[in-house]
Image: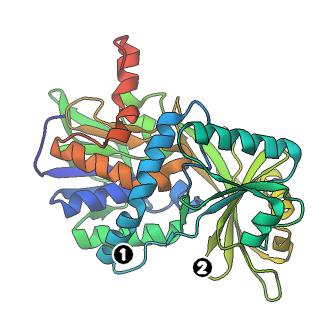
């Protein structure tokens, strides 16, 4: 993309990626308009808020692990800067994460994950069930062992979204509660955005970060981003119930993943199911049943908690589980989408990459594998 010192930037999408990028760009002098009918809603509103690159690692996804580790390392500085800019807390939690296994098969899978991480030079601490309960007394007797990963953090997603909105407004971001229909081009370069309601928006650069809805906004993204449904529950401790854990608790229960992320005021977010059912955001009875059944195996005290909310969101999946961050063409088009389960985690490094692209500078090293142009090159047969 041609370097532009500053200018008019249209950001399409007001989730965590769009809000973070808009705030950073406006702080750097860009005239930013963010288009979203309901900023801070969608998958970002529903998210659990885990910042967990290590405990979500998977063999074969080493580029994603490196990207996540880079971003979680940026989180303390990102949160401190956001706290100051917004005048309110960003919601970062630094207590760490434990991973629990309930049976021999689950324990073997965790041992395989630990061995994989050790081969990559990212060792974890293996713990017995008794040692886990010393760290987190809320963990029940069905848990046979697990891992401690103090570097995997968490964030209160709704506190974060409120802080990003406040920081963006203070930096001069214009929020328009309208839907983008497509990126508009003129003479082979981006000229702005055609909107579903009201007049078009003129822009020198357009950033597409509309999550699961990104594919419809420009032909280069067609077929690359798909919706992946996830259901979550929000619980609150009632008087007399066992206290919740201080750390994030991830678990395998008969091979099924489940997690509980603490919130201020003795709250817990429990998630998350995963299903590819198009743009369906209805909460299912089966999803609620499975989440409650599995988390009660790990944290039996939650049976006495209040069920405050059940919600579903649409994660933006990509063909290789890496996000698409970069300038795939035409000139003036940037994309930052396809973050799947990792939007909260990858917000700092993504915003830094977007700012680098706007300035015509190299993106962080870890972001290069996520270059959005990799799919454009594959379609044309030229390779990455």
The quarter of the image holding the C terminus is top left
Q: Please identify the quarter of the rendering in which residue 49 is found.
A: bottom right
- In the picture, residue 95 is in which quadrant? bottom right
SS assignment at label 1: helix
Question: In the rendering, at what x and y percent does residue 173 appear?
Answer: 25, 64
Quadrant location of the N terminus in the rendered image: top left
Residue shown at 69%/53% (left/top)? Answer: 272
Q: Is residue 211 above or below residue 304?
A: above
Task: Work out whether residue 302 or residue 210 is closer to the camera in this orientation and state it.
Answer: 302
User: Could you say which disc has been placed on residue 264 in the image?
Assistant: 2
Q: Judging from the image, what secondary structure is the residue with disc 2 in? A: loop
Q: Residue at x 36, y 28 (%)?
A: 220
Per the image, the residue denoted by label 1 is 83
Q: Position of residue 307 (x, y in %)?
A: 76, 72
N-terminal label among 2 and 1? 1
Cα separation, mark 2 vs mark 1, equals 17 Å
* Left or right: 214 as drawn, with respect to 105: left
Q: Residue at x 42, y 52 (%)?
A: 71
> Which of the pair 373/316 is nearer the observer?
373
Position of residue 320 measured from the top left corner of the image (x, y, whole percent): 52, 30
Whether residue 348 appears in this view of the structure is yes
> Which mark, by number, is residue 112?
none
Q: Which residue is the extreme one toward the bottom?
A: 239
> Which residue is found at the position 39% from the left and 80% from the top?
88
Residue 20's spot in the image, x, y percent?
A: 35, 59
Residue 285 in the image: above or below residue 261:
above
Give yes or no for contact between labels 2 and 1 (Cβ–Cβ under 8 Å).
Answer: no
């Amino acid at each position: 993309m041609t370097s532009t010192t500053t200018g008019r930037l249209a950001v399409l999408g007001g989730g965590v990626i769009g809000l973070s990028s808009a705030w950073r760009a406006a702080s750097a002098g860009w005239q930013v308009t963010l288009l979203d009918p309901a900023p801070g809603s969608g998958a970002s509103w529903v998210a659990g808020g885990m910042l967990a690159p290590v405990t979500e690692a998977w063999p074969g996804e080493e580029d994603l692990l490196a990207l996540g580790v880079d971003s979680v390392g940026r989180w303390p500085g990102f949160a401190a800067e956001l706290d100051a800019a917004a005048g309110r807390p960003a919601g970062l939690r630094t207590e760490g994460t434990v991973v629990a296994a309930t049976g021999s098969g689950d324990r073997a899978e965790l041992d395989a994950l630990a061995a994989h991480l050790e081969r990559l030079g990212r060792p974890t601490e293996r713990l017995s069930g008794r040692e886990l309960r010393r760290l987190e007394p809320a963990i029940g007797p069905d848990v046979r062992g697990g891992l401690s990963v103090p570097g995997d953090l968490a964030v209160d997603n709704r506190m974060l979204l409120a802080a990003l909105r406040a920081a963006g407004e203070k930096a001069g971001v214009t929020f328009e509660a309208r839907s983008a229909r497509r990126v508009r081009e003129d003479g082979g370069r981006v000229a702005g955005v055609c909107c579903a309601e009201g007049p078009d928006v003129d822009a020198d650069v357009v950033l597409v970060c509309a999550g699961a809805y990104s594919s419809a906004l420009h032909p280069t993204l067609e077929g690359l981003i798909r919706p992946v449904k996830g259901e979550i529950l929000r619980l609150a401790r009632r008087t007399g119930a066992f206290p919740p854990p201080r750390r994030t608790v991830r678990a395998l229960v008969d091979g099924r993943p489940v997690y509980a992320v603490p919130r201020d005021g003795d709250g817990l977010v429990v998630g998350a199911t995963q299903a590819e059912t198009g743009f369906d955001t209805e909460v299912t009875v089966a999803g609620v049943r499975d989440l409650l059944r599995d988390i009660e195996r790990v944290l039996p005290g939650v049976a006495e908690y209040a069920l405050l909310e059940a919600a579903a969101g649409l994660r933006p999946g990509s063909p290789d589980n890496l996000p698409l961050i970069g300038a795939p063409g035409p000139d003036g088009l940037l994309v930052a989408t396809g973050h799947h389960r990792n939007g909260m985690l990858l917000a700092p490094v993504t915003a830094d990459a977007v700012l680098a692209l706007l300035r015509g500078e190299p993106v962080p090293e870890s972001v290069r594998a996520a270059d959005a142009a990799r799919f454009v090159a594959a379609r044309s047969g030229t390779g990455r």
